[in-house]
Image (tube, rainbow, N blue to C red):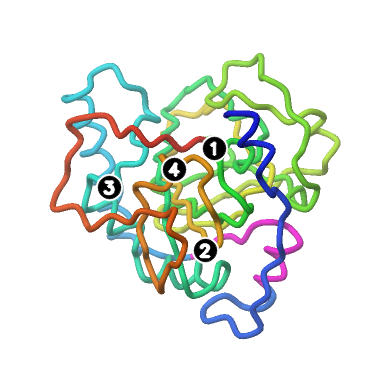
Amino acid sequence: MDPTIAEQRDLRFKPVVNLNPTVLTREQIEHYNSQGYIKPLNAYSEIEARRNRAYFDYLQAELNVHRPGNNNYAINGFHSRCRGLFNICTHPTILDHVQDIVGPNVIAWGSHFFSKVAHDPKHVPWHQDASYWPLTPARTVTVWLAIDDADVENSAMKFLPGTHNRGHLKWKKTERDAVLGQEIEDADQMGQPVYDELKAGQFSLHADMLAHGSDPNASDRRRCGLTIRYCPPEVTALDPHWANNAILCRGVCDNPTWKFIEPPPGEDLTSQVKHKTIGGN
């Protein structure tokens, strides 16, 4: 990221104020403010979760036809090309929960499947998502939707509770075999991790300043999740390329930096999506 852009960002967490939430409880919102996450939440039935899994398998197979040699993290930003993914990003149950965090005007600006196959050796080092993004202020909430069951054994995401309230944490370039390049320094001194264990069809919410990561998947099972990034219109993309494939999910937006897409007509994985989102698990 351009250092000039990085310096313009406000990476302070702002507590959510919502005295009359629709689906979340006031206790859950307080937990989000103090710990940085909420889990587990329900979106899809068991049958629907199986359909989501079959859909991801189709996308992965189709991508391998058009772009052979891509890894399991390559389905990134395709909500602008794939109607099924667009529909997941605009799922009413998910949006009801997100709205209680970001307010009535909801923008989805990114999506990314993170698929850790069995025996994937890569770490996702401790990091803060907002550290990677040319967005300000830090008001994005991430939905992590379980495509497969996620547990400690198959490398469920893990959080460091409360770290979202510590500002932009010092990081270094990781020297390990890793999915992402940043690694927070002295993370082992920031408390005990909490694992984001979810059943397929469940999801969690976490703040963009919360330190999180995941271990290598030493199990015989895949662990796939879909991250969806949501924010209110007060967030501005300092790099305009990051605002070109957004969805206005609910409400209105008077921030002209955001460029909204219409629902795609079908499933198109024939070419690379240039918009790149980094951060996740």
Q: Earlier in the sequence, mark 2 or mark 3?
A: 3
Identify which residue, 162 or 53, lies in the foreground: 162
| Residue 157 placement, left or right of 115 | right
On the rendered structure, is 51 left or right of 95? left
Q: Nearer the viewer, residue 226 or 250?
A: 250
Query: Which residue does the numbered mark 2 point to in the structure image?
Result: 232
Q: Secondary structure at mark 2?
A: loop
Q: Earlier in the sequence, mark 3 or mark 4?
A: 3
Mark 1: amino acid: Gly
- Neighbor class of circle 4 (other Cα within 10 Å; few <14, some 14-19, many 20+) is few
Q: Are marks 2 and 1 in contact (CB under 8 Å)?
A: no
Q: Separation of disc 1 and disc 4 at Cα?
A: 18 Å
Q: Which residue is mark 4?
A: 240
Left or right of 130 in this view: 259: left
Say which quadrant the N terminus sits in. top right
Instruction: Please state which amino acid type lies under the numbered disc 2.
Output: Pro
Q: Earlier in the sequence, mark 1 or mark 3?
A: 3
Q: Which residue is mark 1?
A: 279
Circle nearer the viewer, 2 or 1: 2
In this view, 174 is above or below 196: above
